[in-house]
Image (cartoon, grey):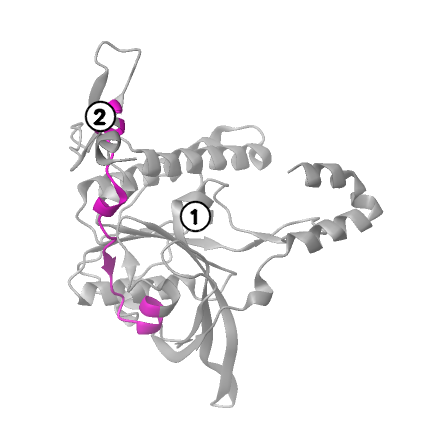
């Protein structure tokens, strides 16, 4: 295929295409932690216009890690915002983590839909370098307060809310500010509508990939109930989040160091392992160790770990386990058909 044929193909869809060599490289925001930027992220820092998930069990230090990252970004002149759904952020602890509370924006909101609307407004304004959501599991839809069966409807309402939010970040959205005025987009998209008199339409849509903001979402690692095979853990937010997150980082406690103080056992520090379970910008399954002190300070241990190939899932072993289990034999045909 020569250049004329390529140009003809691009013209046929209204010129809304480019060749791969014209794709702009992804800009990054250095966090100041070299092990995190160059090894775990593998791209030099937080990627602009992308979403990142940081998840772990309870009491590992997810929020503290997030605050330390915000503090490093602020020191480099970045503007940050925190959507504190858990209502746990205090100015004293934020300052202990290196955050400047006087320039950290903390919006208030009434329920999940209101919070996600304000997140999209901040993204549309394109003035923040990092937006931190803490946490996905703590955000509940307003509609769940008016249902008769909250146990079942809450899950359905939350799944619908997150699916709509992640879809809008990916495909684009229009949004109004508090003055009921549409926030103009920095980029105009060309959309083809064969059923309209105007075959070529220009739309001003806000998309996360067109913004300078890096969106960090903290999530909880939950246990599945009654599962005897496959993964026994999951992160809330629905299946759509698996596609919107470019980087997924799992945090875990590698070591806990205690000591004696006034005759009592006290915590000295925790060693936290940060590992990329998914990375579209660098090789995944890389990990690094960090020291988390009780006062909130996060320091690098200068210890990096290579990819552990034993953790790569072997679907053949899973299939053999299911086939050999009489209770799960009904899944045999379904598994082979996939």
Q: CA distance from mark 1 to mark 2?
A: 42 Å
Where on the picture, by quarter, is residue 244?
top left
Disc 1, SS: helix
Residue at 45% of width from left, 40% of height from top? 140
Residue at 17% of width from left, 60% of height from top? 102
What range is drawn magenta here? 9-38
Q: Position of residue 73 (x, y in %)?
A: 23, 63
Residue 64 forms part of the magenta stretch: no
- Name the residue furthest front: 2
Q: Is residue 148 in view? A: yes
User: Which residue was labeled with disc 1?
Assistant: 136
Q: How many marks?
A: 2
Where on the picture, by quarter, is residue 201?
top left
Vertical relation: 321 (above or below) 12:
below
Along the viewing direction, whichever of 87 and 328 lies nearer the viewer: 328
Q: Residues within 10 Å of mark 2 (few under 14, many from 20)?
A: few
Q: Position of residue 124 (x, y in %)?
A: 21, 39
Q: Quadrant of the N terminus?
A: top left
Along the viewing direction, whichever of 231 and 266 lies nearer the viewer: 231
């Amino acid at each position: 295929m020569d250049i004329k044929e390529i140009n003809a193909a691009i013209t046929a869809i209204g010129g809304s295409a480019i060749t791969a060599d014209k794709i702009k490289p992804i800009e990054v925001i250095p966090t100041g932690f070299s092990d995190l930027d160059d090894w775990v992220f593998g791209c030099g820092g937080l990627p602009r216009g992308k979403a990142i998930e940081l998840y772990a069990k309870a009491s590992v230090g997810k929020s503290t890690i997030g605050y330390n990252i915000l503090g490093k970004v602020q020191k480099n002149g970045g503007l940050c915002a925190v959507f504190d759904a858990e209502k746990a952020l205090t100015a004293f602890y934020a300052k202990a983590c290196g955050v400047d509370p006087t320039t950290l924006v903390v919006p208030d909101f009434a329920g999940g839909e209101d919070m996600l609307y304000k997140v999209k407004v901040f993204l549309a304004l394109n003035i923040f370098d990092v937006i931190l959501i803490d946490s996905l599991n703590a955000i509940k839809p307003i509609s769940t307060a008016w249902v008769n069966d909250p146990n079942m409807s809450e899950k359905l309402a939350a799944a619908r809310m997150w699916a709509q939010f992640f879809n809008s970040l990916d495909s684009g959205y229009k949004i109004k500010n508090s003055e009921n005025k549409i926030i103009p987009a920095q980029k105009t998209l060309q959309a083809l509508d064969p059923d309209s008199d105007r075959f070529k339409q220009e739309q001003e849509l806000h998309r996360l990939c067109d913004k300078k903001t890096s969106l960090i979402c903290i999530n909880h690692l939950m246990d599945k109930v009654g599962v005897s095979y496959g993964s026994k853990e999951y992160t809330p937010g629905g299946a759509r989040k698996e596609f919107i997150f470019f980087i997924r980082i799992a945090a875990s406690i590698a070591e806990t160091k205690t000591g004696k103080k006034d005759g009592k056992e006290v915590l000295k520090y925790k060693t936290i392992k940060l590992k990329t379970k998914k990375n579209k910008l660098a090789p995944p399954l890389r990990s690094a160790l960090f020291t988390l002190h009780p006062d909130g300070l996060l320091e690098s241990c200068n210890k990096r770990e290579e990819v552990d190939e034993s953790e790569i899932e072997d679907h053949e072993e899973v299939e053999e386990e299911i086939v050999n289990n009489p209770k799960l034999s009904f899944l045999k045909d379904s598994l082979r058909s996939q």
